[in-house]
Amino acid sequence: PPPFTGVWMGDSKLCAIGVHCGNHITSHGLALNCCTDLTWFDHIVPCGLEGKGVTSLSHELGQHVAVNHVLQPFLDSFQEVFDCTLVSSEDPG
């Protein structure tokens, strides 16, 4: 929910999105919870947000959702939305 970044399901964060700027370098990242053990979040205040929870695709869908089931559809959607071509560091050339 605004003004918080990420992807939310009600008051629970499903996907964290971040940007870091420092030493003349900008980096960014994304963490999509697919089949994360959510009990680890009981020991911290996720993203420093009191009163907010964390969820996963597996929890929300009520079935195991492995990263390898989500990765390619996610990458395909990313390319479409951002009108780009993704290149893996493992690709030759």
Image (cartoon, rainbow, N blue to C red):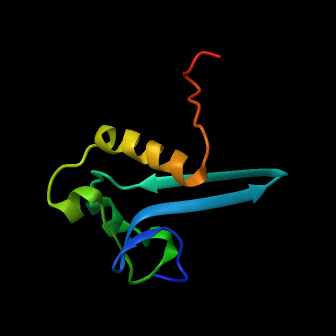
Residue toward you, 76 or 69 = 76
Query: What residue is rendered at 50% in x and 69% in y?
Result: 47
Q: Position of residue 16 (x, y in %)?
A: 48, 62
Q: Where is the N terminus found, in terms of image quarters?
A: bottom left
**Above or below, comparing residue 92 to residue 14 in the picture:** above
The x, y position of residue 69, in whole percent, is 29, 41
Query: Which residue is found at the position 18% from the left and 49% from the top?
Result: 64
47 lies left or right of 42: right
Q: Residue furthest left?
A: 62
Residue 26 left/right relative to 41? right
Front one among 64 and 78: 78
Residue 57 falls in image quadrant: bottom left
Q: Is 48 rendered above or below residue 93?
A: below
From the viewer's side, name the closer residue of 74 and 16: 74
**Residue occupying the point 32% across, 37% down:** 68
Q: Report which quarter residue 55 is drawn in.
A: bottom left
Identify the residue shown where x is 65% and y is 16%.
93
Q: Is residue 22 left or right of residue 85?
A: right
Q: Kindly give the residue lying farthest to the right in the view shown.
A: 24
Q: Residue 75 at what x, y percent from top left?
A: 46, 43
- Residue 10 locus on image (x, y percent): 33, 79
Say whether residue 40 is left or right of residue 5.
left
* Count of labels in the image: 0
